[in-house]
Image: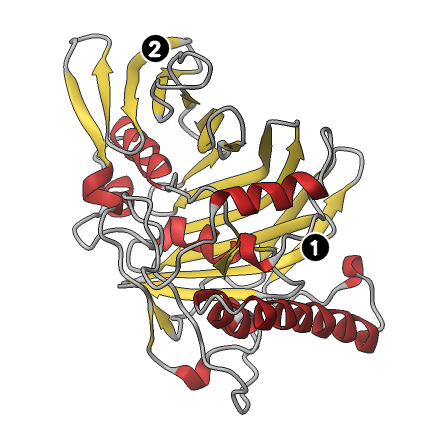
Amino acid sequence: MEATKGRRQSEIVLTKPFSLEGESDQSYRAPSLLSRLLTLLKNVRPGSDLTHFQLPPMFNFPKSQLQCYGESVYCTSSNSNLLSKCNSGQNPLERFTSVVAWSISTTRPTSFGVAPYSPTLGETHHVSKGNLNVLLEQVSVNPPVSALHATDEKENIEMIWWQQPVPKFSGTSIEAEVHGKRLLKLLNHGETYEMNAPHLSIRILPVPGIDWVGNVNIRCLETGLVAEISYNSSHSFLGFGGNRKLIKGKILDSSSFKVLYEVDGQWDKTVKMKDMNSGEVRVIYDAKEAIAGLKTPIVKDEESVWPTESALVWSELSKAIMNKDWEKAKEAKKGVEERQKQMLRESGVKGENWNYKNFRVSYDKERREWDCSPTHKWVPAAPIIAQ
């Protein structure tokens, strides 16, 4: 892993993560919803692929998508130990149910009407929380693909993710499918858990809102245990009312197809699990305990922050947005885009030949699948610390 030190041209700007209340940095308030909706509707058409659509700064929340991905892993309440529970389970079934709870914890509240920045090629985000070190890199921008590697040497845990959002506009809503793969490895037990992510549904009409939807499948390759979890909403009249944060599913043994547990609840409240043999019901996930009252990360060692760090790459734009200086925001966003173009021209390479610093990247055209393997066994401690 390379870290190029040099004179800082900008300060590092970090913002509060989305917590259970859906809040983030209190110094930022988005422009009126109506003005943003009118701007969006003037620039897109039904059926549009929004993968490369560039939002005006008033639609941006002051942080990169890389940071949002990372926060879903490292931003947890100080009293939450979900990842440790995955490792400390006494048997495969205990560990599997803890992995299901941890997977639910990566579902985070979002804010309607604003979106994070689309990361630049080679952009990175490197943060530590306790013994967990998390590193992300944007390995492609066309299409946008983000890779994540996280390790905890004390617990002997490793995570490897790659994600590709594919948003499409239907006229009254935007459906952002999240393609990719998530692997969680409990190395002490020789177990690998493979899972996917829910999709993001952004409703514009009749009632504006944003929901996590779709099916998440979690599988332990070694034990054959499988979870089928559905993110959905209860029925409502013409889009009004109803509950849009429901989770339902089951845990089963794939060798016998026997359902072991039923899972039911809300990802923003509590999720319970019912033992199909004994009838016992217990809470496996409490969102208030896990993702409430989250704090802004801090910079421990500014000189060790990489020039490619998200919080540095976008710092001028983030400051302008937080100050609601939209002219300066436009200039700052254009500046990031111009620097990206210049960097590619000077390097003389195209995106597919990019010199990745932290991952070995390949793409299977027939299967339309990416593979992002970390180049190092362990992620080093980061200069940015999650509280």
Q: Which mark is residue 25?
A: none
Disc 1 is placed on an element classified as: strand
Please indicate whether residue 77 sits to the left or right of residue 196 in the image: left
Q: Residues within 10 Å of mark 1 (few under 14, many from 20)?
A: some
Give residue 53's position: percent from left, percent from top.
Answer: 70, 48
Disc 2 is placed on an element classified as: strand
Please indicate whether residue 237 sits to the left or right of residue 117 in the image: left
Q: Are marks 2 and 1 in contact (CB under 8 Å)?
A: no
Q: Nearer the viewer, mark 2 or mark 1?
A: 1
Q: Which mark is residue 141?
A: 1
Q: Could you tell me the amino acid type at mark 2?
A: Val
Q: In the rendered view, tell whether residue 222 sits above or below residue 140.
A: above
Give residue 174's position: percent from left, percent from top.
Answer: 59, 33
Name the residue beneath numbered marker 2: 259
Please report whichever mark, 2 or 1, sits nearer to the chain's N-terminal start.
Answer: 1
Please indicate whether residue 336 sits to the left or right of residue 282 in the image: right
